[in-house]
Amino acid sequence: MKTIVFSLAASALLIMPTRSLASFGAVPSGGGYIVNNGANLVFTITSGGDMSSCKYKGTELNDTGKASCIASGLSASSVTASTNGGNVIIIKCVSTASEFGNMTHYYIVQSGVDNIYMATYPTMEPTVGELRYIFRGQFNVLPNGPADSNNNGNTGAIESTDVFGHSNGQTTSKYYGSERAKDLTVKGATGSGVGVFTAFGNRESSMGGPFVRDIENQGDGSGSDQEIYNYMNSGHHLDLTIGGQHEAFRVNVLHGPYAFCFTAGSTPSVPDMSFIANLGLTGYVGTSGRGRVVLNGLSGMNTAYTYYMGFANTTAQYWTALNSSGGGECYNMKPGNYTMVIYKNELVVWTGSVTVTAGNATTVHTITITGDPSTTATIWRIGDWDGTALEFLNGGNIMSMHPQDVRNTHWGPVTFTVGSSSTGSFPSCQFRGTNSPTTIKFNLTSAQAGAAHNLNIGITTAYNNGRPSVTINGHALSNPGASTQPGDRSLTTGTYRGNNTTFTWSIPASDFVTGQNTLTITPISGSGDLSPWLSASWAYDCVELAN
């Protein structure tokens, strides 16, 4: 038997006499490789392109019965190893299995650095409907993961097979506790003298824009696995649109690089992955082949909010926060034509287009916001237009728990009195089976009651084709059609993020009265409800009666 090792002084694989793998190198094993990073990591890549073992300082971290992998296993047809400069090992796994088309996945290590860098090049979306890498850690070795997604000790599923209840009335799920894409840095789990963290890396090839959330961690409930994820594409947000543009899965592009980082328990900083530019990965676009967009300023800003500019086309997405003057730069963009949007928090308030060319800066001169509904004069407004439900009752809990969780304030039904009720008492979510109707009481002067007014109800997402049916002083308004929304459960799986939509009714003066008026809002849908929580529903952005 011969062993393939990497010499720190060599730039290619060397055939060496058999020896134990005690230093930086890769040993062929069963059609795959055992890799030593020359520091604290030794891991095994199988002939199928999966990671069946990962040891940190001699402690096995990986589940001994299930490999860490793309999807449920890459089924690689080819696994090869190479080196770059003698101090970088590249394991290239290519799968031609029907569920992957022709996918290339890379494992990369630097000598002496306790990270496993990865990148994935899909030519089609896996037939399972999602593209993600999952590190399957042993729960007893890595017990300290995020509490919101730790399903261990549950008393059974309360929704589908992935949201769980506990004896104290709290709830957990792999969907809970996720950050918005723009906020992703590192996240993971720890144990005694060890930690494993995902460094999510570049999201340019993912889908959903800056505010989409997806699964990051899960204590799987069996007491066996601590699962640490990097989701790149997901059917959880299949129909999400950005600035009105349909967001399909991005394929024939490189996803990453990203990394799994291993420490003695401390949370690492985001690693420098710039060295990967020189490794010749399929689909990698270096900085010389990229451009940038410079925005000189933004007119019409509300200083209470953070503004972002975002860009999207079929091959890439980007975003960056703007400064207090509305200026900003978005760097390292692939060349191409992009839909450009301006977000007020999570609400699109301007849409245009921009062309990026390699090696150049495209300057966009001052933009004047033309689409902020907050500039509309109103008789009353509940909340504000920002594309979120966060200011309303239980709005801050949507991302971390199921609506039935005991930590939520009772949902209602709510009667809200304009002028005396607090914004935080208005429901963030309207469920047909749980807290309907919501009643709004408001006063009008004789002059106000003698004129027609527009009622605007803004939502951030909806489930089961839920949309508002409105009655004003006993007069039923016309029922709207359903909005276009993602096809997942959304509000019970940790997100209010869908497609911001506004429903508008022109209410005639004959429907109003001088003095107190009563308006009720109830969800309608042409589809039946599955449960009180899986019922026709939506999350509110804002409700207003315009002047």
Image: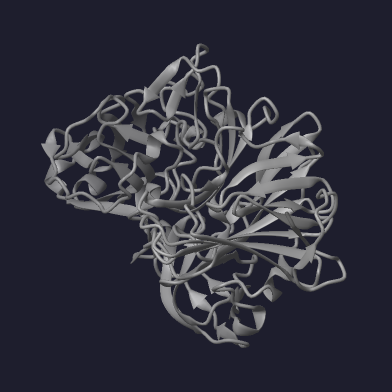
Q: How is the image coloured?
A: one colour
Q: Quadrant of the C terminus?
A: bottom left
User: Is 234 situated left or right of 503 in this image?
Assistant: right
Give the residue at x 50% y 11%. 167
Total of numbered circles in the picture? Answer: 0
Residue closer to the observer: 161 or 409: 161
- 359 over 261 or under it: above or below: below
Residue farthest right in this picture: 9
Residue 472 visible in the snapshot: yes
Residue 520 visible in the snapshot: no
Which quarter of the picture shows residue 26?
Answer: bottom right
User: Is 530 situated left or right of 296 in this image?
Assistant: left
Give the residue at x 56% y 41%. 67
Give x and y (percent) for residue 484. Answer: 26, 54
Residue farthest top in this picture: 167
Which quarter of the picture shows residue 474?
Answer: top left
Which quarter of the picture shows residue 181?
Answer: bottom right
Give x and y (percent) for residue 263. Answer: 79, 43
Give the residue at x 67% y 27%. 143
Residue closer to the observer: 396 or 152: 152
Give the residue at x 50% y 19%. 170
User: Is 142 situated left or right of 304 in this image?
Assistant: right
Q: Quadrant of the N terminus?
A: bottom right
Give x and y (percent) for residue 179. Answer: 56, 46
Give x and y (percent) for residue 235. Answer: 37, 50
Residue closer to the observer: 537 or 15: 15
